[in-house]
Amino acid sequence: VTGGTATGDAATGDAATGDPRRIRVALGQRGYDVVVGTGLLSAAGEFLAPVLRGRRAVVVADETVAALHLPTLAASLDAAGFRHDTVVVPPGEASKSFAQLERLLDAILDLAPERTTAVVALGGGVVGDLAGFAASVLLRGVDLVQAPTTLLAQVDSSVGGKTGIDTRHGKNLVGSFHQPRLVLADIAALDTLPPRELRAGYAEIVKYGLIDDPGFFAWLEHQGRAVLDGDRPARAEAVARSCAAKARIVAADEREEAGARALLNLGHTFAHALEAETGFGADLLHGEAVALGTVLAFDLSARLGLCPPGDAERVRRHLADAGLPVSLRQISLPERSADRLLARMARDKKVRDGRLVLVLARGIGAAFVDAEADPGRVRDFLAERLAA
Ligand SMILES: NC(=O)c1ccc[n+]([C@@H]2O[C@H](COP(=O)([O-])OP(=O)(O)OC[C@H]3O[C@@H](n4cnc5c(N)ncnc54)[C@H](O)[C@@H]3O)[C@@H](O)[C@H]2O)c1
Ligand SMILES: [Zn+2]
């Protein structure tokens, strides 16, 4: 049973007083809470104890996050009586590999884990995806806790159960669905995040408003600056609303079969093509590519007469105000070729029977899946954008 509704709108707690909020991901027996609040890592043991089967954990973190946030988490696990070990991986997308997966699994197996040992993924989406996948295959599946420390991971990758690694054929092509037992999104962990990473995660927050919540987008137009500048109540509100949105979509379509979950790919088919062209590296972060892709999706929707041009302009202005790239002029591509981008888009996983599947919009908060996008029109549109 994958149905059910998330109690997203009823997220409890009060960010102003520091009470954590809980958002339920309603997936029956696989359901779990996303807890959003300040200082959660220093109370992690108390949050984990009621949801885990055992009192043993292996924390997985990258070197950067381990240096900054592992001591806090470890102290709280000690205080709650957890036996715990740590496996550290190199930072960066390259760690989502067969080689690092093997290293990680062997390192955990060296510790003689039991079926009730939990894996705690402390870090960004890279660690969440890698450690989550490892947890799903270790001893045929052990408990997983996501403790996301990037804005992107807090609002997107830690919720929903997608895990995986990259191969030479492309990103995220080997993986599993493995829902966590708990997501602990500590707003305080964001204090150490580089501003560029923060802005990249912000693009995914904007996405939720654009999909189906125009009120949230309007809120972001007023409060986005506070979110970016480090205002904790504003950050908690933005993260909680984003998680509620993702929880709702995941509860309706856990394995991306019914269509609802495909809406989360707003801006992403364009984004993946741009990331592939720029090598999935520091030249263009995923969230930056999503910002560009979202602008392209709205501009194309306006061009096709589906969306008011004023809405597309609002989207562009807001993402630009957030310091995100909104024009192809702002990035360097190896070749400014519409055909190359279109070929990349067609190779994306989101292709059904040779037709381009795109998420387009009838306006802000009114995204829909267009499974019949005309590749010729998309190519002409891209050619014009590349020349602009
Ligand atoms: N599973 C999903 O549903 C899903 C969804 C979206 C994205 N993803 C995946 O997420 C990955 C990207 O995640 P990401 O953007 O979090 O990247 P990331 O995990 O590489 O983190 C970005 C950088 O920030 C550093 N960092 C993390 N937390 C920090 C902190 N609190 N303070 C200082 N530095 C910190 C990391 O060391 C890293 O260098 C991609 O691999 C993508 O495919 C998965
Ligand atoms: Zn994304």
Image: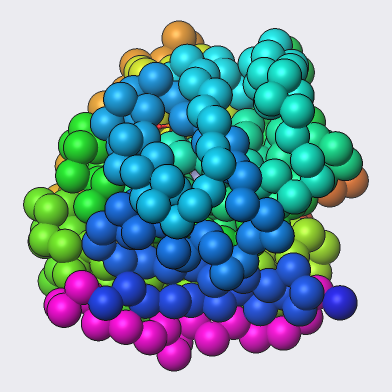
Q: Which residues are magenta?
A: 2-18
Residue nearest the observer in this picture, 123 or 325: 123
Ligand 1 quadrant assignment: top left
- In the image, residue 257 above or below residue 67: below
Residue nearest the observer in this picture, 359 or 1: 1
Colour scheme of the picture = rainbow
Q: Could you say which quadrant of the image residue 199 lies in?
A: top left
Position of residue 276 in the picture relative to residue 311 (left or right):
right
Q: Residue at x 76, y 78 (%)?
A: 28
- Residue extending furthest bottom? 10
Q: Position of residue 87 (x, y in %)?
A: 54, 24
Q: Position of residue 33 (x, y in %)?
A: 54, 71
Q: Tell me the quadrant of the picture where the N terminus can be found.
A: bottom right
Q: Tell me the quadrant of the picture where the C terminus can be found.
A: top left
Q: Residue at x 47, y 15 (%)?
A: 90
Position of residue 118 in the picture relative to residue 206 (left or right):
right
Q: Residue at x 17, y 70 (%)?
A: 233
Q: Could you say which quadrant of the image residue 97 lies in?
A: top right
Q: Residue at x 31, y 53 (%)?
A: 42
Question: Is 333 included in the stretch rendered in magenta?
Answer: no
- In the image, residue 164 above or below residue 304: above
Q: Is residue 112 visible?
A: yes
